[in-house]
Image (cartoon, rainbow, N blue to C red):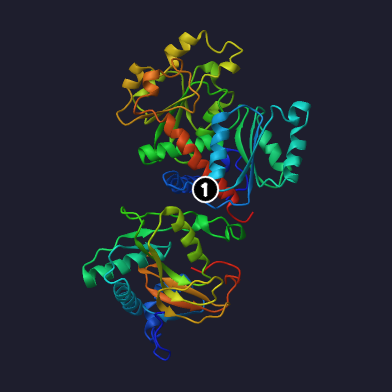
Amino acid sequence: MITHLLSAADLDRATATLVLDTATEMATVAGREVKKLPTLRGRTVVNLFYEDSTRTRTSFEVAAKRLSADVINFSAKGSSVSKGESLKDTALTLQAMGADAVVIRHSASGAPHRLARWVDGSVVNAGDGTHEHPTQALLDAYTMRSRLGTLEGLRVAIVGDVLHSRVARSNVLLLATLGAKVTLVSPPTLLPVGVGCWPCAVGYDLDAVLADVDVVMMLRVQRERMNDSYFPSAREYARRYGLDVARAGRLPEHAIVMHPGPMNRGMEIAPEVADSARATIVEQVANGVSVRMAVLYLLLGGKS
Amino acid sequence: MTAPPAGLPEGRPDHDAANRLDSAEAADPGNHRPILTGSDLSRITARIAHQILEKTRGATDTVLLGIPTRGVPLAARLADRIAAFEGVQVPVGTLDVTLYRDDLRLQRTRAVGPTDLPPGGIDGKRVILADDVLFSGRTVRAALDALNDLGRPSQVQLAVLVDRGHRQLPIRADYVGKNLPTSLAESVRVLLREVDGADAVLLAGPSEDTVPAAGGERR
């Protein structure tokens, strides 16, 4: 097993499958009366969040607590970071406090990689800038596998703002490792440079791929990052790349609709589609806890 | 205890055992000494099944839980035997204890196996844990903790194929296939058809993969 989880590319096929299989067992804990395992008793997990994120932070917190680890939540707001402390000094402080694992979210791409060189414990990337979000990709893969049975040969369309999406990047890498066929569908202005080298296909027309996919993953339009003119108007984006009722109707019977959340209802996804039976959005949140339990167990459970 | 009187040989390492163990020997050409053969194992499971029926008065309200890996087929075999002798279908389940082990941080990360309880659950039932080798007792301790989180059995019993001694915790088995005095430098390998393709119990001499005294059970 690996020491850190910094990128979805760190996982080879066997390791990724091990994480998903472990998550399946962890999921049974959620159905029990006693939702607690003694596995990581005495270990300390620090949630180091430089960006606001209730969903991911809570998910990691619940996962660590279900495994009996001690959790310290550290958010940049109101901490020494606002007094000008550097990431390295924060890392050394955590190290001195005996953190066994640091879960980090940072607005700068690559911050977790830097952190991994400064601390002895395991580092888990919980989203860095526009780079990666590997546990999100794992929970998405887990959701696909539990809904559709297998990932091998699965046709997945990832739709929307690929340029700013760490979810898209991690998903492309992980799904390619696990044998799924990914197509990115996006306005040309919202594709990163070098996307041609990614292990996936690229398209610009959502209607052209709909009839031929098992999974549609809608990405959030990140309004906070839309300071340049990436597309003419929100209305036009919704008309060309939004998953409305008519488009959802053209999906194959078994196809599922995913969204990493939080959603802009009416923009990239219509409310009726988000609430339909084929949407897995709430399921993804529940699966997130199981997958993060699996990751924490596999990183911290054995001899380091 | 279910140990036979001293002097009555239970598993006799007969001469043609080596021929029957070809596949096992080929898989691991170490200095393995056969202790029990396939026919010994089937006699032993039959005996334990009879003992369970006797001790539990018909095995009603009883659940067999196998501890992976080789406890699982063992539990299934015991249930088969009990069904053949008395026509009682004892529910069989699997209890993975990995997440409850106390040696997790001493060893490499272990893969977590499945835990499947029979549909009726274990509340108020007599649970019989089945495992292949009883050694330090730490696996059984972990299993008792795991049971605690899963329900409240009325009683917990333990059935093992081989008791090799060297207990580190005050635990003993209710049903023992064979008491096998060993040295700590030796290792006991149980092979079952369902997992290994052959039935046998082998005793291997000192080797570098021998479990240290503080470690868990050797499976």
| Amino acid type at image mark 1 | Thr
User: Where is A140 relative to B207, above or below?
Assistant: above
Residue shown at the point (53%, 56%) measured from the top left: B110
Horizontally, is A183 left or right of A47 in the view? left
Residue A174 in picture, x, y percent from top left: 51, 38
Mark 1 secondary-structure assignment: helix
The quarter of the picture where residue B88 lies is bottom left
The quarter of the picture where residue A105 lies is top right
Chain letter of disc 1? Answer: A
Horizontally, is A263 left or right of A84 in the view? left
User: Where is A233 relative to A151, above or below?
Assistant: above
Q: Nearer the viewer, residue B54 or B202?
A: B54
Residue B24 in picture, x, y percent from top left: 42, 72
Residue, disc 1: A15
User: Where is A274 relative to A233, above or below?
Assistant: below
The answer to whether any part of residue A11 appears in the image is no
Q: Decide: few, some or many residues near mark 1? Use Cα within 10 Å; few <14, some 14-19, many ≥20.
A: some
Horizontally, is A176 left or right of A246 in the view? right
The quarter of the picture where residue A193 lies is top right
The answer to whether any part of residue A141 appears in the image is yes
